[in-house]
Image (tube, rainbow, N blue to C red):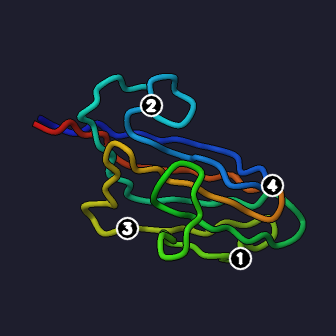
């Protein structure tokens, strides 16, 4: 079975937030899939700062709304320059998120937008 591409954009609000989770049914942190055996392969993340000052971003892979040490993913208080963006790229196969894995993020302020690009797959 062939994977399907997804593109999700989420605004960070200054507190830890769930950005992505494979099997969410309500579409708030997932991509509208109802299968329990789905997975996501995140290929790249772009973080855009729309403010006049730099803001840090931290991303984590783990439990819902978690920011535990050792679960950082691609950015740990990484500065995003004012009115600019940073790219976080993963190996060609992507970073796999299975059922129960969450991509969470936080910043110290508002004004960051996170764009996540990847593929949706279904376990055989």
Circle 4 sits on which residue? 111
Camera-side residue: 57 or 9?
A: 57
- The image quarter containing residue 2 is top left
Q: How many residues crowd around disc 4 within 10 Å: few (fewer than 14), some, or many (20 or more)?
A: many
Q: Residue at x 65, y 77 (%)?
A: 78
Disc 1 to disc 4, how far (Cα)? 13 Å
Disc 4 to disc 3, how far (Cα)? 24 Å
Circle 1 sits on which residue? 79
Disc 2 to disc 4, how far (Cα)? 25 Å
**35 up-or-down from 82: above or below:** above
Q: Is residue 16 left or right of residue 54?
A: left
Q: Residue at x 61, y 69 (%)?
A: 86
- Count the labels in the image: 4
Disc 2 to disc 3, how far (Cα)? 23 Å
Q: Which mark is residue 24?
A: 2
Q: Residue at x 67, y 67 (%)?
A: 57
Q: Is residue 124 left or right of residue 51?
A: left
Q: Which comes sooner in the sequence, label 3 or label 1?
A: 1
- The image quarter containing residue 75 is bottom right
Circle 3 sits on which residue? 90
Quadrant that contains the N terminus: top left
Label 1 SS:
strand
């Amino acid at each position: 079975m062939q994977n399907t591409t997804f593109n999700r954009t989420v605004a960070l609000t200054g507190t830890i937030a769930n950005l992505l989770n494979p099997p969410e049914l309500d579409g708030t942190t997932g991509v509208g899939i109802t299968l329990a055996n789905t997975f996501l392969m995140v290929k790249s993340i772009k973080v855009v700062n729309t403010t006049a000052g730099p803001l840090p971003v931290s991303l984590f892979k783990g439990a819902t709304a978690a920011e535990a040490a050792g679960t950082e993913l691609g950015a740990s208080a990484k500065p995003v320059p004012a009115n600019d963006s940073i790219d976080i790229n993963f190996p060609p196969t992507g970073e796999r998120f299975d059922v129960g894995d969450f991509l969470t993020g936080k910043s110290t302020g508002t004004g960051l937008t996170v764009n996540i690009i990847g593929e949706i797959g279904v376990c055989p």
